Amino acid sequence: MRVQLQPAYVLHTQAYSNTSLILDVFSLDFGRIRLLARGVRSAKSMRRALLQAFTPLNISWTGRSDLKTLTDVELDANSHLPKLQGDGLFNGLYVNELLIKLTHANDPHEDIFFLYKNVIEDLSGSQDQAFSLRCFEYQLLEFLGYGLAIESIDDLSDGTKIYQYQPEAGLVLHSGGKSALPLIEGRYLLSLLQKEICGDEGMQQLKNLMRFTLHYHLDGKKIQSRVLYQ
């Protein structure tokens, strides 16, 4: 099978033999795939500079096995070239790792491709990066079928209502007392649903909720980018 100039982003690279790389790539029409990029680490290769994380590319490959062979790569001239620095760079690595560990190989997800494209652009700008990450995490879970179903909850604007996430039941109304599960006020769930930035307390509750939910669906897989950031 030959695929020509497919929009894609490199998520991770791994050295292979003396001059090659194995790439984890997320593509528009084919989802996450693995590619063997032969010879790109040699001094004469012009492709290595392009095969960087967060760079919008058009790539071509051939092969039917799980490890396909890269045949061509070029910069996507129609896309903005993001520049991630500082916290934005670490947050971008975190986003890449989530895609690698939560998505299945060769499973097309056009909606996730554009979700990724948007969050990378957010992380390269001056937007509130923490809130951009919470929105990305929430929508990623929705697209993967692990959604919190916030839109189905009534009276989220009622400041007296507090919810907790139960892995087998989703978000349920908290009946009071102490809980080992993360608690979150309904108004902050509404902020997430409407993509409206909330204050420090709301952001902390959203972070606790998303971290707990992702940990459950990662099934024990550790997020290495968090360790790197710390």
Image: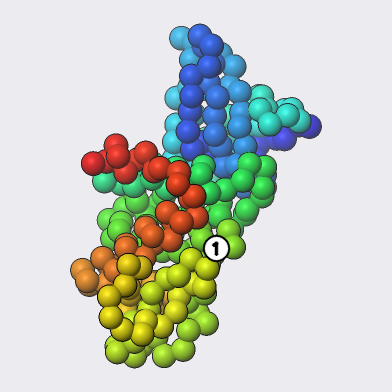
In the rendered structure, the answer to whether residue 143 lies left or right of residue 49 reads: right
Residue topped by disc 1 = 146
In the rendered structure, the answer to whether residue 35 lies left or right of residue 18 reads: right
The correct choice, above or below, for 224 with respect to 49 in the image is below
In x, y percent, where is residue 54?
A: 44, 40
Foreground pick, 123 / 166: 166
In x, y percent, where is residue 159?
A: 29, 88
In x, y percent, where is residue 217?
A: 50, 55
Foreground pick, 70 / 185: 185
Instruction: Tell me, yes or no, if residue 83 can be seen here.
Output: no
The correct choice, above or below, for 53 with respect to 141 in the image is above
The C terminus: image quadrant:
top left
Residue at 51% across / 61% down in the picture? 141
Instruction: Tell me, yes or no, if residue 17 can be seen here.
Output: yes
In x, y percent, where is residue 222?
A: 40, 42
Mark 1: give few (<14), some (14-19) or many (20+) Cα within 10 Å. Answer: some
The N terminus: image quadrant:
top right
**Amino acid type of disc 1?**
Tyr
In the rendered structure, the answer to whether residue 199 lies left or right of residue 226 reads: left
Residue at 76% across / 30% down in the picture? 64
Foreground pick, 28 / 63: 63
